[in-house]
């Protein structure tokens, strides 16, 4: 008999970032018992790293904004592969979720007349990001925790879930362990909400924290749920590049939103060299007009630094490959130049971008009020994830819900900056609401003991091997390979080689060995993370190989143009009965005529 402790809840939420906390608050408000499992300590979720702001059409800075403009921007940014049901709900409900957060105590920056201040961001037509300096995610987590902690929600900090438990095809709970002592836990629940974030740790250079090993994606896939659009991995154009110890740490888009300029080693604003036709009527034709846009002039055009992230990232890579990069393999991001335009510029920069100022001062010895930063692309976000119903957030497995980065649909082929935080609020709330309703009607039976024994045996397997590799070596090799073969610029040859490499890495991971015991054993934790990393890496590589075009965050050097054929479907990944990974293409549901008109009106 496997030794474990059982916990029972109506709704179990895996992940304690913005989506998980918002889901927990909503489920608790519905009168059900709620448990939240988090891999790290409460308050350490990766949401705290979201800096620029939360996108919502409040129209506090520009009264021309509204849900229709936000919807059209989101669909255009996602290259129309978005789940348009989710995009509509998101645009309509985001303002209410932000005002709700304010009512719960969030301290947003303010306009002169006391309303929530909003800033410009890439891909957004009008200033739309409600923000708290450049620490918006941190304020969101603080507010949600303060509001939720008194609602009777039970938190299991420093616990990791390794398997979902099933009964008759529905989810009835989860199996995991506490990371401190390595003791097993069984969580029995009528509904499970995945809110585990992304997959960035599958790549060498990433802004993501150590928790982002694709846990939720892998848990859902192995439980029988479908994944969708996994080829679309967003490489944020600006991460730190120096010193090596901090390579990949995010440099918020808010720097560019406040007037930061991208220049090469010749001092040229190279973004002017490649402005897509779609944006030419919105993009600055000269530097002065770009600055006027930043300062809020409604008649000025958008500067090219605020084009979509995929486009900016590729332009930066082009400059680096052409030998026009910075000394350490990036380009320059300059906010100090605004001293030409405003008095007390250093004080202004420190007020608007306090985290960026301290980050570069402490980690790189750079004073951003006086000199440019060195930046380059970093793996940041995955648009693909668990396929969910647009209204309820339930996956293709009954009782299993997903919200936030782990869920697919809202962002299509490319996410706009700031849409991630409003995504967490809008669909975290919806997931919690519908998970609670589901659990009330369908209490969970006791899990089958055989499932629990199998899960425990799989977790302990790395201790039982007489020989084998160090799991850290395998993870390191995986990250290097994914960065090189399935990164910003992709080719068929590279991705075919990646699939061969993943097969070999899978064999190596199944013989990975750890020493010591279950207490305080990070090597064991890494060995258990490998299955998740390999699963999501294969899903990304297979999906990217199948999509023979360039669209959004997915760029194929051997197929650089967009294809009408691939504009009509999403890529679906599912586990076949023999255990292999299978892909299929599924047609996108026709968009409603009224929403077509909204898009046409706002893209004119």
Image: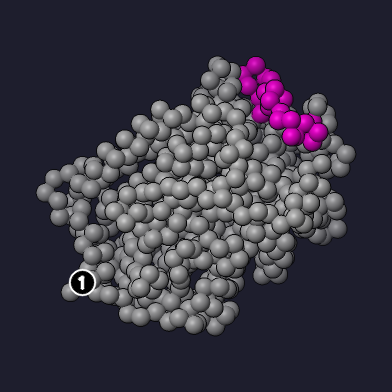
Which secondary structure is most common in the magenta stretch?
loop
Image position, residue 597 (x, y; %): 79, 51
User: In this rendering, would 51 be left or right of 128?
Assistant: left
Q: Is residue 414 visible?
A: no
Residue, disc 1: 2
Q: Is residue 324 visible?
A: yes
Quadrant of the image for the C terminus? top right
Circle 1 SS class: loop
Q: Which residues are magenta?
A: 262-284
Whether 336 is among the magenta residues is no
Name the residue located 38 percent from the left edge and 69 percent from the top edge: 169
Image position, residue 216 (x, y; %): 43, 57
Whether 269 is among the magenta residues is yes
Pick whichever, 367 or 228, lies toward us. Answer: 228
Q: Quadrant of residue 14?
A: bottom left
In this rendering, is residue 1 above or below 492?
below
Q: How is the rendered protein coloured?
A: one colour
């Amino acid at each position: 008999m496997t030794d474990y402790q059982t916990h029972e809840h109506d709704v179990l939420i895996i992940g304690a970032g913005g989506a998980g906390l918002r889901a927990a608050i909503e489920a608790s408000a519905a009168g059900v018992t709620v448990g939240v499992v988090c891999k790290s300590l409460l308050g350490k979720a990766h949401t705290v790293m979201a800096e620029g702001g939360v996108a919502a059409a409040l129209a506090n800075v520009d009264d021309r904004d509204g849900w229709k403009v936000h919807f059209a921007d989101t669909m255009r940014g996602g290259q129309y592969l978005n789940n348009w049901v989710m995009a509509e709900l998101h645009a309509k409900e985001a303002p209410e979720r932000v005002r709700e957060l304010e009512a719960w105590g969030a301290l947003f920056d303010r306009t002169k007349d006391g309303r929530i201040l909003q800033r410009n961001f890439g891909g957004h037509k009008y200033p739309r990001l409600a923000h708290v300096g450049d620490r918006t995610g941190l304020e969101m987590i603080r507010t949600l925790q303060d509001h939720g902690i008194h609602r009777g929600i039970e938190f299991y900090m420093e616990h990791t879930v390794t398997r979902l438990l099933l009964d008759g095809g529905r989810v009835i709970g989860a199996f995991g362990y506490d990371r401190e002592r390595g003791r097993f836990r069984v969580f029995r629940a009528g509904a499970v909400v995945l809110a585990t974030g992304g997959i960035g740790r599958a790549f060498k250079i990433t802004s993501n924290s150590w928790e982002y090993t694709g846990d939720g994606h892998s848990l859902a896939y192995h439980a029988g749920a479908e994944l969708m659009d996994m080829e679309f991995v967003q490489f944020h154009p600006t991460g730190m590049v120096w010193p090596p110890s901090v390579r990949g740490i995010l440099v918020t888009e808010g720097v560019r939103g406040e007037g930061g300029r991208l220049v090469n080693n010749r001092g040229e604003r190279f973004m002017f060299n490649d402005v897509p036709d779609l944006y030419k009527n919105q993009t600055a034709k000269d530097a002065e007009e770009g600055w006027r846009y930043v300062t809020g002039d409604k008649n000025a055009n958008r500067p090219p630094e605020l084009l979509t992230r995929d486009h900016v990232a590729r332009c930066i890579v082009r400059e680096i490959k052409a030998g026009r990069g910075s000394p350490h393999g990036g380009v320059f991001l300059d906010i100090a130049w605004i001293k030409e335009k405003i008095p007390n510029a250093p004080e202004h920069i420190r007020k608007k971008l306090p985290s960026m100022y301290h980050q570069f001062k402490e980690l790189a010895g750079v004073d951003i009020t006086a000199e440019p930063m060195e930046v380059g692309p970093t793996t940041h976000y995955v648009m693909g994830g668990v396929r969910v119903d647009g209204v309820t957030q339930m996956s293709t497995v009954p009782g299993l819900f997903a919200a936030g980065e782990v869920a697919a649909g809202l962002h299509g082929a490319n996410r706009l900056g700031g849409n991630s935080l409003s995504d967490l609020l809008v669909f975290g709330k919806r997931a919690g609401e519908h998970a609670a309703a589901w659990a009330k009607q369908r209490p969970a039976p006791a899990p089958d003991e055989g499932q629990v024994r199998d899960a425990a045996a799989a977790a302990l397997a790395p201790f039982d091997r007489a020989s084998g590799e160090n799991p850290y070596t395998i993870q390191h090799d995986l990250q290097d390979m994914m960065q090189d073969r399935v990164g910003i610029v992709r080719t068929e040859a590279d991705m075919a080689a990646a699939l061969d490499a993943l097969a070999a890495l899978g064999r190596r991971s199944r013989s990975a060995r750890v020493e010591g015991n279950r207490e305080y054993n990070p090597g064991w934790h890494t060995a258990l993370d490998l299955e998740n990393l390999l699963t999501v890496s294969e899903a990304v590589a297979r999906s990217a190989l199948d999509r023979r075009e360039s669209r959004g965050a997915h760029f194929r050097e051997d197929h650089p143009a967009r294809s009408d054929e691939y504009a009509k479907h999403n890529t679906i990944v599912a586990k076949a009965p023999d255990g292999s990974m299978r892909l299929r293409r599924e047609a996108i549901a026709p968009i409603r005529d009224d929403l077509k008109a909204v898009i046409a009106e706002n893209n004119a």
